[in-house]
Amino acid sequence: MSLTLKSAAPSRIDPRGPRFGAAITTVVLALVLLTGSPWLLAVQTLVFALGSIVGLSAQPYGVIYRRFVRPRLSPPRELEDAAPPRFAQFVGFLFAAAALVGFALGIGLLTTIAVAFALAAAFLNAAFDFCLGCEIYVLGQRFLSRN
Amino acid sequence: MTAGVVALVVALVASSAFGLWRRRTDGRFRSANPVEAERLSAAELGDELGSRATLVQFSSEFCAPCRATRLVLSDVASNTPGVRHVELAAEYHHELIRRFDVRRTPTLLVLDAGGVVRHRAAGATDRQQVLAALATVTR
């Protein structure tokens, strides 16, 4: 009987997990915009941080998906790489952190705009399976390799 | 919190519009301007050209739509005589990326027998669209 070591950084994952997480994120961020709650924003920022810095296995919405949703579904047709969703979590973290900074400095506009962008990205992912990494990667490459 | 309500509505409407637009335009081939007639040689491509057409795919790592597109294009190529599928990693072809203004992956170019770019598309495509684009090139 072999022991499987589950790291917080799986290489291939069920693609429905991140989309489920993106749907929850969309709802949470919508609530942040509607209620203006900095606590809810802080929670979502932490969620993003866990998912990007620690790894997808630590992403709370992913945990919910794996424990409560996935067992009710048929197995995924195919797996996807964990890197793009993890990158998307990092982008979300940057926006959410900027929003928190806006709150700390009393710049309400920064908070609102940053949350709105994070929400748009999460919504695009949840509703349209939008691949943020695919969009940014090449442009990033071109920018970095310019001479 | 009216600023929040406005921001929420704008964010949802704008991203929905964008998402729907992308859904329509993803993988759709546009004809290249014949006046500009860009050509890719086998040397530049790093691979042979197809005797009737070449399907060039720019991909990046960890790109799920690239994977799906690869399956479609290689399937079409293996079932269509004279058509080759060449996949290029964006990170190793900076010059081509710039020359063809590739901004996202996958980006596809359909070359004719002489290596001239006849159509291009961005985003994951399907069999039907590829075959339609090829039909105009492999007459």
Image: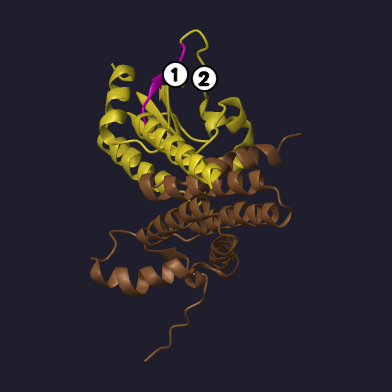
* Viewer-nearest of discs 1 and 2: 2
Where residue A87 sits in the image (x, y, percent)?
Answer: 55, 55
The chain shown in yellow is which? B
Residue farthest along the top direction in this orientation: B35
Quarter containing the C terminus of chain B: top left
Reply above or below: B111 against A119: above
In the image, B19 versus A35, the foreground residue is A35
Residue farthest along the bottom direction in this orientation: A1
- Is residue B28 rendered magenta in the image? yes
Tag 1 and tag 2, C-beta contact below 8 Å? yes
Residue B21 numbered mark, or none: none
Q: Which residue is mark 1?
A: B114
Q: Which residue is mark 2?
A: B39
Where residue B103 sits in the image (x, y, percent)?
Answer: 55, 34
Where residue A91 sits in the image (x, y, percent)?
Answer: 58, 52
Secondary structure of residue under mark 1: loop
In the image, taking residue A39 as reference, residue B129 lies left or right, namely left
In the image, A11 versus B133, the foreground residue is A11
Q: Amino acid at mark 1?
A: Gly
* Magenta-drawn segment: B27-33
Secondary structure of residue under mark 2: loop
Chain bearing tag 2 is: B
Q: Which residue is located at x 58 percent, y 31 percent? A: B96
Residue A130: which quarter of the image? top left
Where residue B9 sits in the image (x, y, percent)?
Answer: 45, 40
The chain shown in brown is which? A
In the image, taking residue A55 as reference, residue B19 lies left or right, namely left
In the image, A126 versus A108, the foreground residue is A108
